[in-house]
Image: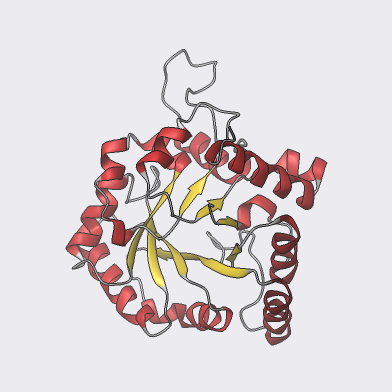
Amino acid sequence: MRIYSLAYLTSNTLTPPQAVRLAGELGYAFVGLRLLPNAPGAPQQFLIGQPEVLRETVAAQNDTGVGVFDLEIIRIAEGFDARSYLPLLEAGAALKAKAVLVAGDDTDEARLSENYARLCELMQAYGLSADLEFMPWTAVPDAKAALRVINAAGRPGNAGILVDALHVARSGTTLGDIRAIPRALLHYAQICDAPTSAPPPKGIGRTFTVEEMIHTARCERLLPGEGGIELSDLFAALPQDLPVSVEVPHEKRLAELGPTEWARQALAASRALLEPQG
């Protein structure tokens, strides 16, 4: 039986306690929370520095049995100061979270690796793994780059690589690259679907622009099975007991269906693909 987590982006209109309670209602075992924005002024869930929201979220966890799997987001850029993220780590410990999603933006790979190592060291006391997500528009564009950064950092005990199906499909990462990731570095993976060829008008066979990739990633993913990503092959290449974060943001469908029904459909589609009957 797979373990599923309701990712922040799937139903991103919910507060942390609402997300936990919805996950419990629908059959998710965990939630992911975005307690820091992915860019200044971008959407997030507010909990840090709000003790009443923390209390409500912990109460929802106790009532439902739903855990917090991952928190978002730490971005490692030039001038990175790991200690500035202590409030996020403290919230993670209070919520008994397992992982923090990390993005690499520093194009100086040696410095990026050094700062990643420092972050891992700081996070150990909080019981959190630092899961580096490769994204094709960042300084860590593919699985090979993520593994290279972690190896250069000395492969800390709480290091991790986050595999997102969308970024696998759009980064040139191969199934061989996925199989080459050591099992100890895999803590969870994200599932969604999307078109695998860029739309007109610029011609058949063109590559996606950065703007298109970012838009799809944040605003318009498809349910598993609706697009062209070879999800069955990808998840066959990953450990079969790996927890699955269901990350299917779609602004229009979320607005039309509401967070409960959209999260329900996202889980059902994920289960249908990963746990086929018969």
| Residue 4 at least partly seen | yes
Residue at 66% from the left image edge and 67% from the top image edge: 45
Considering depth in this image, is 114 or 26 the residue closer to the camera? 26
**Count of marks placed on residues:** 0
Q: Quadrant of the C terminus?
A: top right
Question: Which of the 4 image quadrants contains residue 78?
Answer: bottom left
Residue pictured at 62% horizontal, 53% vertical: 9
Image check: 150 left or right of 245? left
| Rendering coords of residue 47 (x, y %) | 65, 76
Q: Where is 194 relative to 36, above or below?
A: above
**Left or right of 76 in this view: 53:** right
Q: Nearest the camera: 207 or 98?
A: 98
Residue 260 sits above or below residue 76 on the image: above
On the picture, is 97 further left or further right than 131?
right
Q: Nearer the viewer, residue 84 or 54?
A: 54
- For this orientation, the residue located farthest to the top is 204
- Asked if residue 104 can be seen in this view, the reply is no
Q: Position of residue 244 (x, y in %)?
A: 51, 52
In the rendered image, the residue lying farthest to the front is: 278
Here the colouring is secondary structure
Position of residue 136 measured from the top left corner of the image (x, y, whole percent):
38, 42
Q: Position of residue 6 (x, y in %)?
A: 62, 56
